[in-house]
Amino acid sequence: MSRPRSTPASPITTPPSTATAPVADAAAVQDFIAAGEILGSACFGCGPDVPHGLHIQRTGRDGTTAFAEFTVIPEHQGAPGLAHGGLLATAMDEILGTSAWLLGRRYVTGRLETDYLAPVPVGSLVHLRSWCKGVDGRKAYLEAEGRLGGPDGRVAVRAAALFIEVPLEHFTAKGTP
Ligand SMILES: CCCCCCCCCC(=O)SCCNC(=O)CCNC(=O)[C@H](O)C(C)(C)COP(=O)(O)OP(=O)(O)OC[C@H]1O[C@@H](n2cnc3c(N)ncnc32)[C@H](O)[C@@H]1OP(=O)(O)O
């Protein structure tokens, strides 16, 4: 099935007609810049203690739209000289999770759809942006993009996602590894 180029979203990541507009939570907004400290330093996406992690820096927000950036280092390489696609999907996941954070509830990624539109060279500064399109019960529908050459540069990667709200026990309960 061909899809319009204007959105990467499949029916699963497209908000239904029953979805409501997202509202930024005041407490989550307050915690936004400190979120990395609240979550700890071991996150592969944003943790400063992960040697070859993405070290994504959250730079700002507007409503439930989150902004961030990171630099592609040689350890992020896939094909010669270019960022690994899975690495870029990870960056999408991180910025999508950041936008979900602004909703003030605990969410995990249920489904992540990624479109690669242009190669991302090692050494690139990637400008990330994510926004929530709607909320329907436990489901949050989000989109994201990564741009090169500046915050309003060309889109190299974009994503659509379905995040699912979970209880705190999702993170504290110990499962079988
Ligand atoms: C500032 C903060 C920055 C933070 C950045 C961090 C970003 C990183 C975010 C992540 O990477 S989270 C880690 C990756 N994700 C996971 O590990 C989630 C693993 N999956 C699960 O734990 C469960 O499958 C999940 C909690 C998502 C759902 O299980 P539940 O038993 O709670 O719910 P259920 O399966 O009944 O699904 C609830 C609804 O969601 C729907 N759903 C769940 N997963 C889906 C899926 N994958 N695709 C489509 N729909 C899905 C499901 O159909 C259902 O719809 P209905 O209510 O309409 O029936």
Image (cartoon, helix red, strand yellow):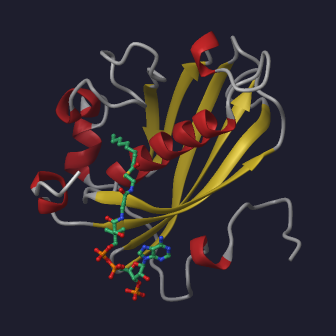
Instruction: Decide: is 73 above or below 56.
Output: above
Q: Is residue 61 left or right of residue 17?
A: left
Instruction: Decide: is 106 above or below 74.
Output: below
Q: Nearer the viewer, residue 135 or 46?
A: 46
Give the residue displayed 18% in from the left and 56% down from the top: 176
Do we see residue 128 in this rendering? yes
Please state the horizontal and vertical placement of residue 53, each as a whole percent of the image: 44, 22
Q: Ligand 1: which quarter?
A: bottom left
Instruction: Decide: is 6 above or below 15.
Output: above
Please state the horizontal and vertical placement of residue 137, each as a whole percent of the image: 34, 80
Q: Is residue 137 left or right of residue 94?
A: left
Tell me how many marks there are. Answer: 0
Q: Quadrant of residue 113?
A: bottom right
Give the residue displayed 67% in from the left and 28% down from the top: 151
Do we see residue 63 in this rendering? no
Q: Quadrant of residue 149?
A: top right
Please state the horizontal and vertical placement of residue 109, each as a whole percent of the image: 42, 58
Dividing the image into 4 quarters, which one contains the N terminus? bottom right
Give the residue displayed 49% in from the left and 41% down from the top: 95
In this view, the residue farthest toward the bottom is 18
Q: Nearer the viewer, residue 63 or 34?
A: 34
In this view, the residue farthest toward the front is 177
Please state the horizontal and vertical placement of residue 5, each as a whole percent of the image: 85, 60
Give the residue displayed 59% in from the left and 33% down from the top: 87
